[in-house]
Image: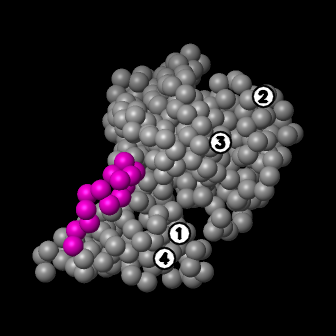
Amino acid sequence: MDEQMAARRAFGAHLAALRKRARLTQPQLAARLCVVSSTTTVTRSDVSRWERGKRVPDAWLPSLATALAVPLEELERAAAQARGEVAELPQDDHPHAVVQQRAGWLLAHDTAHGGDHVADAAVQVWRAERAQIIGGDKARLAVVSEVAEIAGWLLFDAARPEEARAAWLESLHLARSAGDQTMQWFAMSLLAMEAAQSGRVGEALSLCEEITDRPVPPRVALLAEVRRSRALAAAGDRPRALQAIGRARSRLEDSLHSRDPHWSWWVDELEVTGHDGEVALLLGEPARAVSRFEQTVGLQKSVNPMGRGALYFAVAELDALVRLGAWREAEAPLLRLKPLLRTVASSRIQGRLRSTLRAIDRDGPAWLVDTAREVAES
């Protein structure tokens, strides 16, 4: 009985790692399974039971394979092992599974604690796997493309944008060599994000046009509109920026589609509302930005009240309130930062926070300046 329970727990841990690699929370995976299977019966509690080894999701394996973008055979073998029906799989049965599992752990760490302390680890995994590329092994090319994308994101979060751009360019090149269209879209989207934030608006807009110059899955099109809106706002083109973020929001009302790539399922109401707030800030409309970031704080609490996302939106709300000169309202997000800063290390977010704290120190009332200095020292 103990051995069977251990096997079930091992399957659950494997399933959780696949979910984290896909950047899905348990509720998001449950929602995705409902879409894939055309039912409404899968809940977060079901996913939690599977991941804790309380139950093996035999009937849901095909839907899980689709939702997590993994071969059905892999899940079937792992489930059979959990039931004690097969011997342990050979170590090299899935030569790329270990790499993808490590990447999932790095992403999970970033979600909880930021990218500063794991960016170099991701780069190490990326370079080690790149060195193993031999000839035209498309499976390995696709895996290294994904690892390069993850390394790029962690570098970006660690405020190392030039290194992040280099990683995403390689991810795009490898994805093209592997014929992996979905990873090409992802790499171009991330490159567009970095270009817009670095002031290369033309490059960002060109990448968005390249993504959408032919029909693409709904969530891919949505994300391209988000990137386009940020670039247009950075260029001061208010009408077109608002049109683009409006199109993104309208697309959000559409259900998730089976054609959407696995990496796109985190593009949800929280993500779009946050970008809507950033667009407002770029357009010099802090009051509208405050209303959007207040919404994101509530949405973030329902997903995870701690972690990198909570820190990001607390800093964004504080930034908008300070630009508005709403000093009394700025106290609440400022006080929320202390426990978050003790557990999250994201140089990207902390750089924005330092700039906002300097603005408080320069323009704010004395009582708020004292609080800001306490936060700066924490």
Q: Could you say where residue 44 lies in the image, as x and y percent from the top left?
A: 44, 71
Q: Residue 62 got which mark?
A: 4
Q: Could you say where residue 329 lies in the image, as x and y percent from the top left?
A: 57, 38
Residue 190 shown left or right of residue 158 in the figure? right
| Amino acid found under the numbered disc labelled 4 | Pro
| Amino acid found under the numbered disc labelled 2 | Gly
Q: CA distance from mark 3 to mark 1?
A: 23 Å
**At 59% across and 55% down in the image, what residue appears?**
264
Q: Earlier in the sequence, mark 3 or mark 4?
A: 4
**At 37% across and 65% down in the image, what residue appears?**
15
Q: Which span of residues is magenta-colored?
A: 87-101
SS class of the residue under badge 3?
A: helix
Q: Residue furthest right?
A: 239
User: Given contact means CB atoms under 8 Å apart, are the residues at marks 1 and 4 in contact?
Assistant: yes
| Amino acid found under the numbered disc labelled 1 | Thr
Q: CA distance from mark 2 to mark 1?
A: 36 Å
| Magenta span includes 90 | yes
SS class of the residue under badge 1?
A: helix
Badge 2 is on which residue?
Answer: 202
SS class of the residue under badge 4?
A: helix
Q: Could you say where residue 324 lies in the image, as x and y percent from the top left?
A: 67, 31
Badge 1 is on which residue?
Answer: 66
**At 59% across and 43% down in the image, what residue appears?**
177
User: Given contact means CB atoms under 8 Å apart, are the residues at marks 3 and 4 in contact?
Assistant: no
Residue 276 shown left or right of residue 22 in the figure? right
Q: How many other residues sit within 10 Å of disc 3, few (<14), some (14-19) or many (≥20)?
A: many
The answer to whether residue 67 is seen in the rendering is yes
The front one of 62 and 19 is: 62
Q: Residue 144 got which mark?
A: none
Q: How many other residues sit within 10 Å of disc 1, few (<14), some (14-19) or many (≥20)?
A: some
